Amino acid sequence: MDKRVYRNVDLLFVVFTFLLLAASLFILSTASINVDKADPMHYVKAQAVWIASGIVIAIVLASIDYQKWRHFRWWIYGLNLALLGAVILFGSSAKGATRWIPITSTITIQPSEFAKIFIILTLADFLAERQGKLNNFKDFIPPFLFVLIPMLLIFKQPDLGTTLVFAAIFIGMMFVAGANPYKFGGLLLGGVCIVAVALWLHFATDLPWWLHWAQGLPLPMQDYQLKRLTIFVNPAADTTGDGYHIIQSIWAIGSGGFWGKGYRMGTQGQLNFLPEHHTDFIFSVVGEEFGFIGTVTLLFIFLIFILRSVSIAMKARGPYGMLVGTGIISMFTFHILVNVGMTSGIMPVTGIPLPLISFGGSAMWSNMAAVGLLLSINLRSQRLMF
């Protein structure tokens, strides 16, 4: 790659990416200290390996012209479906879900994490060809079906959280691709209303006689998934079951106060009352041990990271780069909002990790691949004149 290309690099984006990676190791050094008694630093060392290898992935993808991925749209899409199908056929199960493919006796990969990157790359090309042709309801059908197939494979695992991430990516990219905002927005609003009514009918127990036929409406979801979607409204209704996670998380964040209890001085996290506090609920540890100041600082770093990502996408040299950037921004933003929301008790618990912070190899590689693609767009945002 021509060295002059590096003049375009967004240094602020790079700096804040490394701040998030450093924050991940620092927070994990307290969040996971009591998870593995035999090796208290196990998760920190493993995360360091994922981060180092993730940086290599980001550098490789940044060095490749992102436009080249357009030529392999159907190959990437096919690989995506093949990996997701392999999970159903050969995947290993844990905690009631089959989401991982074993590589060795100790290493597994989660294809649904990489599926987010694959769908962004392929859907961006699919929509770039249809810019200016997304004005009617029938125009929305082909891109919807394009995303629906991998979404259904992920939903079957079951993985409701990643399914919702796919929906967020699709919505963000459709609007930027030029979908009629009134018709597409109305369609989305109608869909939300239908889901809300379906949930109400499913849980309703005292409906009028003329609605008895719909009482207990069956839904294509596991009982625990449905419970998680509604328990956040009143977690006290099930303090030892599905509401336990939310209650412990709220206690952890609330007990941190303004300054926090101090590094490794928390109780909910250090005594393992708070479940999954090194993965999905790692933000709760930040709130408990570093307080309001710690959470605001972390959210500020995320804010700058997202704003620089938006700047990169807006400067892309063509619709494909802008759509890839939009998909990545939609993915990161949805992850952040939902993770912070669910740990704060204002959103359902959907098992969505905090990007670039939570422990996880597949998630870290996927996030760093997204960073690499953004840098690829950034580096090629201006033509070389001399």
Image (tube, grey):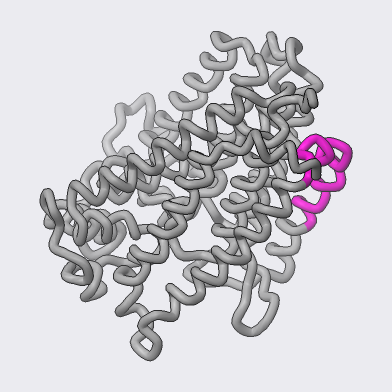
Left-right relation of 180 to 263: right
Q: Can you give x and y, in whole percent of width and height, for residue 341 in the image?
A: 32, 43
Q: Is residue 65 magenta?
A: yes
Left or right of residue 46: residue 295: left
Whether 43 is drawn above or below 245: the answer is below
Magenta segment includes 46: no
Residue 262 sits in quarter: bottom left
Quarter of the image for the C terminus: give it: top right
Q: Which residues are magenta?
A: 64-82
Q: Foreground residue, 97 or 361?
A: 361
Q: Is residue 45 above or below residue 12?
A: below
Q: Residue at 59%, 62% (x, y): give it.
A: 362
Image-quadrant location for residue 211: top left
Q: In the shown orientation, is residue 1 left or right of residue 223?
A: right
Quadrant housing the N terminus: top right
- Residue positioned 62% across, 27% down in the render: 173
Label tally: 0
